[in-house]
Image (cartoon, rainbow, N blue to C red):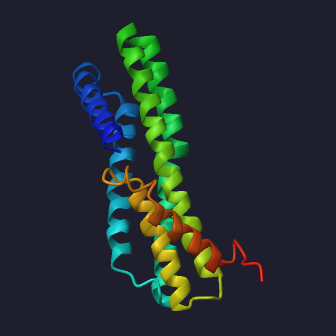
C-alpha cells in the first residue's frame, strides 16, 4: 500500500506542474483533476460518517447502506465512466498537440491512475456488496454482526502495512475458518 501511495503522489506531482505550465486552459485536464479530488473528498467524508454508525441496529445498517451506495455511485462515475472519457480526451489532445514526452508521460499517468482507480472501485464495490447483503439478511443477531465486523477487520488489516507477517499467521487463518463455519459456508460433519 505504501508503494502504491508513493507512486500515486509522485505521479500526481510530476503530472500537475508540467500540465499547469504548458496547458493551463485545457478543460479536460482540469475536469479530470476535479473529478479525482472531489470523489476523494466525498468518499472520505462518507467513510468518516460510516465510522460513527452502529451497524448492529436496523437504523445504523440502513444509513450505512445508503452511504456506501452513494459512494459507489460517485466512484463509479468519477473514477470509472467519466474518468475513462476524460482520460481519452486528454491522451488524444497530448498526442495531437504536445510533444512525445508529454504523450508518454500522459500514457504512464493514465495507466497508473487507472490501476489505482480499479482498486478503489473494487473496494467501494466490496463494501457495497457487504452492507447490502447484510441489510437483506434477516439474521442481525449479535453473533452474526460480530462475525461480519471481524471479517471486515481482518480484510482491512490484510491491506495495512503492518500486516505482511500477520497474513500468514495461524491465528488469522483459524479466525477465518471459524467465521466460515459459523456463517454456514462450511458445515461440520456429525
Determine the residue positioned at 69% across, 72% down: 185
Q: Position of residue 170 (x, y in %)?
A: 47, 62
Q: State the quadrant of the C terminus.
A: bottom right
In terms of depth relative to the viewer, which is nearer, 83 or 163? 163
Drawn side of residue 15 relative to residue 177, left or right: left
Determine the residue positioned at 55% across, 58% down: 125
In terms of depth relative to the viewer, which is nearer, 77 or 143? 143
In terms of depth relative to the viewer, which is nearer, 15 or 3? 3
Residue 9 vertical position relative to residue 77 in the rendered view, above or below:
above
Q: Position of residue 26 (x, y in %)?
A: 35, 27
In terms of depth relative to the viewer, which is nearer, 108 or 75? 108
Determine the residue positioned at 26% across, 26% down: 14
Residue 71 vertical position relative to residue 100 in the rendered view, above or below:
below
Q: State the quadrant of the N terminus.
A: top left
Query: In the orientation shown, which residue stands out farthest toward the right?
Result: 190
How many labels sit on residues? 0
Determine the residue positioned at 32% across, 50% down: 161
Q: Position of residue 163 (x, y in %)?
A: 36, 54
- Residue 109 position by quadrant: top left
Q: Position of residue 187 (x, y in %)?
A: 73, 76
Query: In the orientation shown, which residue stands out farthest toward the front?
Result: 190
Drawn side of residue 60 relative to residue 187, left or right: left
Amino acid at each position: 500500500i505504501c508503494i502504491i501511495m508513493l507512486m500515486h503522489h509522485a505521479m500526481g506531482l510530476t503530472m500537475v506542474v508540467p500540465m499547469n505550465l504548458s496547458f493551463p486552459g485545457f478543460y479536460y485536464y482540469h475536469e479530470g483533476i476535479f473529478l479525482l479530488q472531489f470523489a476523494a473528498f466525498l468518499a472520505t467524508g462518507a467513510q468518516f460518517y460510516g465510522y460513527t454508525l452502529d451497524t448492529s441496529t436496523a437504523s445504523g445498517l440502513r444509513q450505512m447502506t445508503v452511504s456506501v451506495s452513494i459512494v459507489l455511485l460517485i466512484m463509479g462515475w468519477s473514477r470509472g465512466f467519466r474518468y475513462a472519457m476524460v482520460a481519452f480526451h486528454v491522451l488524444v489532445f497530448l498526442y495531437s498537440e504536445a510533444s512525445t514526452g508529454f504523450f508518454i508521460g500522459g500514457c504512464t499517468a493514465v495507466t497508473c491512475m487507472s490501476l489505482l482507480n480499479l482498486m478503489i472501485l473494487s473496494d467501494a464495490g466490496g463494501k457495497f456488496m457487504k452492507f447490502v447483503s447484510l441489510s437483506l439478511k434477516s439474521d442481525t443477531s449479535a453473533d452474526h454482526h460480530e462475525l461480519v465486523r471481524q471479517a471486515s477487520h481482518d480484510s482491512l488489516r490484510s491491506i495495512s502495512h503492518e500486516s505482511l507477517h500477520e497474513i500468514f499467521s495461524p491465528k488469522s487463518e483459524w479466525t477465518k475458518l471459524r467465521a466460515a463455519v459459523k456463517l454456514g459456508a462450511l458445515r461440520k460433519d456429525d
